[in-house]
Image (tube, helix red, strand yellow):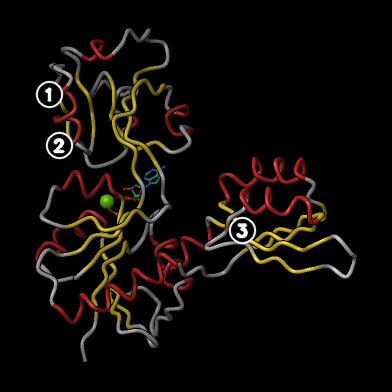
Amino acid sequence: MCTLKLAIQKNGRLSEQSLELLKTCGIRLANGDRKLRATATNFPLEVLFLRDDDIPQYVEQGVADIGILGENEVLEKARNVATLDRLSFAACRLSLAIPREESYTGLRYFNNKRIATSYPRILGAFLKEQQIVAEIEEIGGSVEIAPGIGLADGICDIVSTGSTLLMNGLKEVETILRSEAVLIATPGIGPGPAAILEQLRFRIRAVHNAATHKYILLNAPDAALAEISTLIPGMKSPTILPLAREGWSSIHSVVREDIFWEVTGQLKKAGAEGILVIPIEKMIL
Ligand code: ATP
Ligand code: MG
């Protein structure tokens, strides 16, 4: 039987959330002890656990049909793979940082400086585009200690909260890339795995839509129904049910999480009362 082969990070910042995504998509793994591979019991999927650095190559070669990893790694490796979806987790940025006591004068600060990084390709392309001539010191890890030990003047590394930089006496001065986990696919995916991939992406979208929307219920006087319906149009149109109390209705709809507070204010102004907000588990458009 045909299966889809998915590569995810074995151990690291993406591992838990990649497995969590499969779980919320209703996919159960048989031997989830992350040895090297695991098979799903209720979906035609095989999971390969790898170092994230190796995932672009495995996916390019078709050893895995698809992979989940940070976009930063996809761009750095520059393999022939297709980026299909952004997955809204593992958000971070690739930034330039310098010792805290240095005064920063703009990108030209980096002219004739040495910059330590694990992302020589992305950094090289950025510096070229910005017409900065700097030396790139490629190192595999612990980049943030490079200035302190005299290996470089600055660094280019992944930052999420900035606490690692702070601990190492560095300050972030430029962001050169914003990254998050992405789903990539091999260019020559066969029709069998491609069909399974579409089922998986369908589930991922349903989970993502659910996470970014809320179900909302409220009561309003009938006179306010028209205005409220335009504020919360929902997927097609809101559901309106009459209340036992004459002249009042209950309105049910779906709102995007990011505009939720703004909309709630407008709803109250329009006459809405007793607003209830409920999480959605899956949402299929
Ligand atoms: P591996 O052993 O698989 O090569 P790694 O050490 O290269 O692991 P991790 O530190 O686990 O990688 O990070 C994996 C990815 O998580 C990064 O490439 C990046 O996309 C994302 N990420 C999110 N926040 C951070 C952060 N604060 N520091 C590093 N990576 C982060
Ligand atoms: Mg790695």
Q: Earlier in the sequence, mark 2 or mark 3?
A: 2
Outermost residue toward the bottom in this view: 1
Q: Position of residue 280 (x, y in %)?
A: 59, 66
Drawn side of residue 79 relative to residue 263, left or right: left
Q: Badge 3, how many Cα within 10 Å: few under 14, some, many 20+?
A: many
Q: Position of residue 24 (x, y in %)?
A: 48, 71
| Element carrying mark 1 | helix
Q: Amino acid at mark 2?
A: Arg
Distance between the alpha carbons at the discs numbered 1 and 3: 45 Å
Q: Residue at x 89, y 64 (%)?
A: 246
What residue would you read off at disc 1? 128
Kindly identify which numbered label has been placed on residue 284.
Answer: none
Q: Position of residue 237 (x, y in %)?
A: 58, 62
Distance between the alpha carbons at the discs numbered 2 and 3: 41 Å
Q: Earlier in the sequence, mark 2 or mark 1?
A: 2
Q: Pick whichever, 205 or 64, lies toward us.
A: 205
What residue would you read off at disc 2? 121
Q: Earlier in the sequence, mark 1 or mark 3?
A: 1
What residue would you read off at disc 3? 214
